[in-house]
Image (cartoon, rainbow, N blue to C red):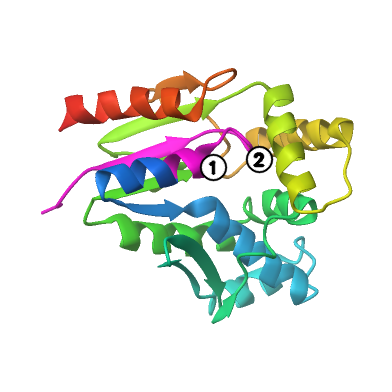
Amino acid sequence: MKSGLVIAIDGPSGAGKSTIAGLLAQRLGYLQIDTGAMYRAVALLISRAGIDPSDVAAVERLCSNVDVRLEVVDGVQRVTANGQDVTGQIRTPEMSLMTSRVSALRPVREAMVRAQRVMGCNGRVVLEGRDIGTVVFPDADLKFFLSASPEERGRRRFTELLAKGEQVTLEDTIAEVILRDEQDSRRDLAPLRQAEDAIAIDSSGLAIEDVLSTMEGFVKQKL
């Protein structure tokens, strides 16, 4: 018997899913499961091991023993991969593109989907990613599809990277967002798409509080 709702938030890269999911989970007293961070952690392990993503057998061997965990430390979610804290290493532009490549591989998806289902099976969770409502939890109690224009998402990402001291341009960042969208939407395994029963929210021009209020309204209706 579940103790609460399973809430799925899907959408393209840079739509604000992680921020919104974290705040919504906090307000509801739920656990946030940042699935994107989990895939980024696996991508980092593959990169560090020098494995070519096209070598599916090598990827499968790595995934057979991979251990990715999400923990909240002092109110901040930390990501560990095989016992190492990789929170600060998984948010680079290089890892964004690598993640899009490896997250389409069956061994990676199977390993992460298993982990996500175990973490969310009892409810009281907010999961965000690209295929939560379509693949991971197709029977989720509530599904949202959060999007924004590529330009808007590129500007947000550009600001984040500058704050971290990264040397990037706005034009390149927007181009990276568009490329990531194409990769995520065209992949054969679990492509990015909106579930038929998902509630669509376009966050372009909206404040975070506006998006949260909209979602909270639907949560209250469901409860």
Residue 7 located within the stretch drawn in magenta: yes
Question: Does 19 sit above or below residue 75?
Answer: above
Q: Position of residue 207 (x, y in %)?
A: 51, 24
Q: Nearer the viewer, residue 119 or 102?
A: 119
Q: For residue 134, what is the image quadrant? A: top left
Task: Provide the residue designation for mark 1.
Answer: 190
Q: For residue 45, what is the image quadrant? A: bottom right
Q: Nearer the viewer, residue 51 or 70?
A: 70
Q: Position of residue 211 (x, y in %)?
A: 43, 25
Q: Position of residue 187 (x, y in %)?
A: 66, 40
Crowding near pointer 2: few (<14 within 10 Å), some, many (20+)?
Answer: some
Residue extent of the magenta highlight: 1-21
Outermost residue to the left: 1
Amino acid at the residue labelled 2: Arg
Q: CA distance from mark 1 to mark 2?
A: 7 Å
Q: For residue 171, what is the image quadrant? A: top right
Q: Looking at the image, can residue 194 be seen?
A: no
Query: Element under label 2?
Result: loop
Task: Provide the residue designation for mark 2.
Answer: 187
Q: Residue at x 51, y 39 (%)?
A: 17
Question: Does 19 sit above or below residue 48?
Answer: above
* The N terminus: image quadrant: bottom left
Amino acid at the residue labelled 1: Ala
| Relative side of 221 to 45, left or right | left
Residue 87 located within the stretch drawn in magenta: no
Q: Nearer the viewer, residue 151 or 180?
A: 151
Labels 1 & 2 near each other (Cβ < 8 A): yes
Q: Residue at x 62, y 70 (%)?
A: 86
Crowding near pointer 1: few (<14 within 10 Å), some, many (20+)?
Answer: many
Query: Element under label 1?
Result: loop
